[in-house]
Amino acid sequence: MARSSRQIALLVNPTAGRGRGARSAVLAAARLREAGFVVRELVGRDAEEARELGSAAVAEGPEALVVCGGDGLVHLGAGLVAGTGTALGVIPAGTGNDLARYLDLPRTDPVAAADRIVASRTRRIDLARSGGRHFVTVLAAGFDAVVNERANRMRWPRGQMRYTLATIAELRTFQPIRYTLDLDGVERRAEAMLVAVGNGPSFGGGLRITEGASFDDGWLDVVLIRPLSRAELVRAYPRLFNGTIVDHPAYERHRVRRVTLAAPDIVTYADGERFGALPLTVECVPGALTVIA
């Protein structure tokens, strides 16, 4: 195919990374056009408009949908291209960038990230699916999800401090949650601080809750953190950053193809986005997503 006929849709979250999305998109688009691609830039004012623009673009069959933003936009883009002939490219511009970390994409240089799109080397990775929705990295269904819910109700402050204050507030009253899980047909009832379902190893900018999970092994990693005191939970938190949480005595891991989670009053988050209330059934869809890596 002639280089000049290669079509790319560039879907941008201009507010990602406190405006880094917009700046990165300008540099990435220039590099892609310089390499001979026809680039259609799409900027959504909110998630719904971004979804509509991206869906319409994918329907036209571009070579790639390239998302310039954070994990939320990766989440949206993956759902749009799953099962199509369109690959997903990523120009990291958010605060988490967990898929970009796993793929070892340049996270601070949008031109270097665009060079990966130019090289067009692809690989297939798994997705996790619940009903008609997909997620890429980790679904959170416990203390972390409760913190997200509280933070989303807060109007002040903005940014990471809001999540810090929400965490402190929840720590004062949080009690272990009673879960019922179906793990490939085997029922497990347990009290836990959280349950996480990982298609990949991390979420939230490198929190390695499902350390060891791989995007291309055909499995989901289901992790429970059994009950801890508030002080123990605070002490265990830093271990998420280097993966040593797996050695904590409260850590429990299962590898499954399919899991059903049930617990009262829990709204889950996946790829950092509000996903849905429990109960939910999640299954691994091997090789469902083509990514440019």
Image (spheres, grey):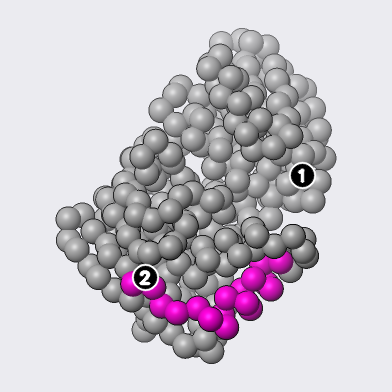
* Apparent side of residue 196 relative to residue 145 in the rendered image (left or right): left
Residue 236 visible (yes or no)? no
At label 1, the amino acid type is Thr
Residue 65 visible (yes or no)? yes
**Crowd rating for badge 1 (residues with CA inside 10 Å; few <14, some 14–19, many 20+):** some
Q: Is residue 112 above or below residue 182?
A: above
Q: Is residue 224 above or below residue 202?
A: below
Q: Is residue 167 above or below residue 207?
A: below
* Apparent side of residue 280 relative to residue 155 in the rendered image (left or right): left
Question: In terms of secondary structure, what is the magenta stretch mainly?
Answer: helix
Residue at image x 65%, y 47%? 70
The residue labelled by disc 2 is 224
Q: Secondary structure at mark 2?
A: strand
In magenta segment, residue 173: yes
At label 2, the amino acid type is Leu
Instruction: Kindly give the residue lying farthest to the left in the view shown.
Output: 185
* x and y percentages locating residue 238 in the rendered image: 57, 78
Which quadrant, please, contains the C terminus?
top right
Which quadrant, please, contains the N terminus?
top right
What stretch of residues is rendered in magenta? 162-178
Q: Gap between marks 2 and 1, in whole Å?
A: 34 Å
* Apparent side of residue 213 relative to residue 66 in the rendered image (left or right): left
* x and y percentages locating residue 97 in the rendered image: 62, 51
Q: Which mark is residue 195?
A: none
Residue at image x 46%, y 22%? 85
Q: Secondary structure at mark 1?
A: loop
Q: How many marks?
A: 2
The residue labelled by disc 1 is 15
